Amino acid sequence: MVKKIGVLTSGGDCAGLNAAIRAITCRAIQTYGWHVVGIHNGTTGLIIRPLDYRHLTIESCNSMMMRSGGTMLGSTNKHDPFNFPDAQGNQTDRSQDFIEGYHELGLDALVGIGGDGSMRVLWHLAQQGNLNLVTIPKTIDNDLGHTESAIGYPTAVEVATEALDRLQPTAASHRRVMILEVMGRDAGHIALSAGIAGGADIILIPEIPYSLDKISHKISSLADLGKTFALIIVAEAVKTEDGEPVVLSREGNRPRYGGVSHYLAEKISESTGAEVRVMVLGHVQRGGQPCAQDRILASAFGVHAVDLIADNKFDRMVAWHNRRVEDVPIADAIKQFQEVDTQGAMVRTARGLGIFLGD
Ligand code: F6P
């Protein structure tokens, strides 16, 4: 029986998505002789009419694709099929259109590559329409439960580490306090890992409340030790000292974080007299070439996702665990928000190196 499978990328883009699409295509065509269809712009390609998709072939998925950033299929973190915006700006439930689109295209199964929000939506669609779904975790935030890593996270950490590498000499040359603000939504994984790898003096993450007094004291004590500059890395969702979130805007219930580094800069400059500069790294963390670890993760996830379909195993998310690719129920994965374990290895490592975590 010749199968036809669809693949879509949903939510914020990140490095490694094309590597996953390539792996899915290679495995499905070369090993199983299936047809592969790439759905455009997340779930939107199956909602609108005419359907928006392209056929994926071995030729269209060469190794150049693995090296490229973004997603060749397009993505969106706005078009929720259950609240889909129409031309007038009203929101309607288009879930049934998505389900009919899946059948109209003759799909036997769908591989959804997404983070927690996208995966939740896909899972509800699959439940409602009895669709055959497997998912692949991608998120630079690395906040999904039941997997140790997700596509995009390793590259985001690399980029943030490189930013610290580049900020260090200029901070040292000018004897400044340099604050790097990184993404990660409500989890501090990027800040913590990049802070360790990039030699930060202070790492601030949402999971650990901080004291401005203690931060000032740390900066002064670095000066007492003869260190003429300080590197601080802060996760975007860190709040003000009295617990106010710092947001650029709100889209429904979803805050767009950004700007806490400016708040900290003002406070630190007032209390220490240091010259402080800020860099908000933003979307650079999502773009560019995927690092080797992301290509490996994406390739392993893509192959395993297709093998799950071949075994008729659905409603599963592929996962990285103990050096192995495994799979877990999607329903479990979306239930668990994976914040930084404040007693875990990374926090202990940072503290062990003398990095100040604000508390
Ligand atoms: O979830 C990924 C992420 O990059 C977050 O780290 C960040 O807060 C958010 O998406 C930015 O979203 P947008 O691309 O809509 O600005």
Image (cartoon, grey):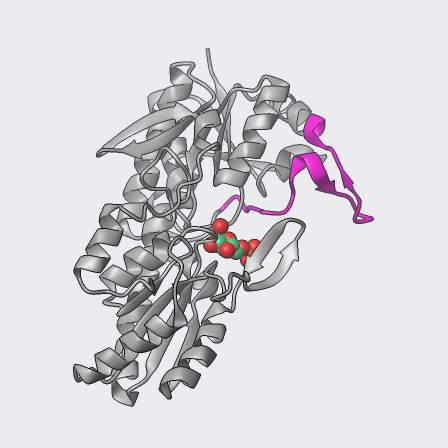
Query: Which quadrant would the C terminus be assigned to in this image?
Result: bottom left
Question: Is 92 part of what is drawn in magenta?
Answer: yes
Whether residue 282 is visible, yes or no, is yes
Percent coordinates x, y for residue 2 in the rendering: 47, 15
Give the residue furthest to the right.
88
Name the residue located 72 percent from the left edge and 32 percent from the top edge.
Answer: 94
Q: Hey, which quadrant is residue 350 in on the image? A: bottom left
Write down the region rendered in magenta: 72-97
Whether residue 169 is visible, yes or no, is no
Report the predominant secondary structure element of the magenta stretch: loop
Percent coordinates x, y for residue 357 in the rendering: 31, 62
Instruction: Give whichever of 334, 16 is nearer the camera.
Output: 334
Instruction: Give whichever of 106, 256 is nearer the camera.
Output: 256
Instruction: Give whichever of 298, 266 is nearer the camera.
Output: 266
Q: Is residue 107 left or right of residue 314?
A: right
Percent coordinates x, y for residue 202 in the rendering: 30, 68
Q: Is residue 236 above or below residue 141?
A: below
Name the residue located 39 percent from the left edge and 39 percent from the top edge.
Answer: 20
Name the residue located 53 percent from the left edge and 45 percent from the top edge.
Answer: 11
Percent coordinates x, y for residue 354 in the rendering: 19, 65
Q: Is residue 260 above or below residue 60?
A: below
Name the residue located 47 percent from the left edge and 22 percent from the top edge.
Answer: 315
Q: Hey, which quadrant is residue 127 in on the image? A: top right
Q: Is residue 26 above or below residue 140?
A: above
